[in-house]
Image: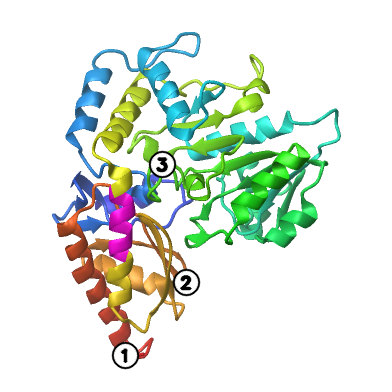
Amino acid sequence: MTLHERYADAMMKTLSPPLAVLVRGEGCYVWDENGTKYLDFLAGIAVNSLGHAHPDMVAAAQQQIGTLAHISNYFASPSQIELAERLKRLTGAGDAGRVYFCNSGAEANEAAFKLARLNTAGGRRSRILALNDSFHGRTMGALALTGKPLMRAPFEPVPGGVQHIETSIAALERELDDTVAALFLEPVKGEAGVIDLPEGYLHRARELCTQHGVLLIIDEVQTGAGRTGKWFAYEHSNVLPDAVTVAKGIGGGVPIGALVTFGDTSDLFLRGQHGSTFGGNPFVTATSNAVLGVIERDDLVGNAARRGEEIRELLVGMDSPLISEVRGRGLLLGIGLSEPVALKLAAAALVEGLIVNAANEFSIRIAPPLIVGDAELADFDERFRAALARVTSSGLVPATR
């Protein structure tokens, strides 16, 4: 049996058949079982911050796995404490901040959901607001927060009390009042195709949440760890949340997530109200410390900002009738298409040795490793142009503007 056949025979049918079986990676490139080389401009969906097999990450993982891999939450480890302190500093939570470790973005949002339930104000706060077309995860609580009805429908009833609203300041002003416990939002809607919030949205959300005693909870699972050209995307708006959820890029490939609370929000959870067997164990926190340390040391946040602008210029310079707009910030970009051919374009890119993602039929999502440089951008330019040419020459779109 081939590896693809063995996959189909062994794996649950929750995912599409794999595009390839990947066996190794180095930097911004990966290779499949046939030796085919691909430029990875998805980075495991914004996970592989340092690319593949980064020597600092490898060294930290090897050292820790040979020393102390896992303990229980009855004990602490130096790497766990160091990472919590680092996240307090990087997020801006400061001395009053607190950190809860878990294993994924969905779990971080589950913890945040429970946190929101504690902001009851004597029972008056019964509603949680989230945004239409948002994505916060696939576990039941995270799914309840997710603003995609078709995704929720097979699993109804999901936990109640969540109201999804239009992503507009007018809707925010209309719905946010003293009966709301929390507002959940993504600063950029990644799964929706890298959709930016309206201008001024986060500022107004912060003002209204402060006015009404509502927790502003920002999901930075995909946008955090420097991906948008700031450590966290809310920094672009000069606001601070009451809580932030992080995962993906903070681990560079190891499964880790965290909920970070700010100010008085840090006092809501009491002993025994939440926990995780594996959350924050020595192995994942030591590796995460190495990843975040390299991002700081090598100014990869600045690199994300610079390279993102360069990629944007490359895309605009392609002058393709298929590219209608470029959305997002830093190294999380959405390519808006003039025709519903994203799946075909992503497939054409793979044939050209380029990994990108069709978030929906009109959007290509790109999220390369934060280490991306001149050579990789030149390679992307060549390969993506070739993919565009394949789709354009198929007769699906006009050849010129």
Give the residue at mark 2. Answer: 361
Q: Residue at x 47, y 34 (%)?
A: 91
Mark in the foreground, 3 or 1: 3
Q: What secondary structure is found at the residue carrying circle 3?
A: loop
Sequence-wise, which precedes: disc 3 or disc 2?
3
Q: What quarter of the picture does the C terminus occupy?
A: bottom left
Range drawn in magenta: 303-311
CA gap, disc 3 to disc 2?
30 Å
- Disc 1 secondary structure class: loop
Question: x and y percent of residue 376 in the render?
Answer: 19, 58
Q: Which residue is mark 1?
A: 399
Q: Amino acid at mark 3?
A: Trp
The amino acid marked with disc number 2 is: Glu
Assign a secondary structure to mark 2.
Answer: loop
> In the rendering, which numbered label is found on residue 231?
3
What crowding class fits label 1: few (fewer than 14 Cα within 10 Å), some (14-19), or many (20 or more)?
some
Q: Earlier in the sequence, mark 2 or mark 1?
A: 2
**Residue 304 in magenta?**
yes
Residue depicted at 33% across the width and 17% down the height: 69
Q: Position of residue 337 (x, y in %)?
A: 43, 76
Determine whether label 3 and label 1 are within 8 Å by CB. Answer: no
Instruction: Check residue 43 for magenta coloring.
Output: no
Left or right placement of residue 270 versus residue 232 in this view: right
Relative to 391, is 80 above or below?
Answer: above
Task: Say which residue appears at 41% left-offset and 13% top-offset.
Answer: 71
Q: CA distance from mark 3 to mark 1?
A: 40 Å
Q: Is residue 286 visible?
A: yes
Decide whether the magenta segment is chiefly helix, strand or loop: helix
**Badge 3 or badge 1: first in the primary sequence:** 3
> In this orientation, does residue 48 appear?
no
2 vs 1, front mark? 1
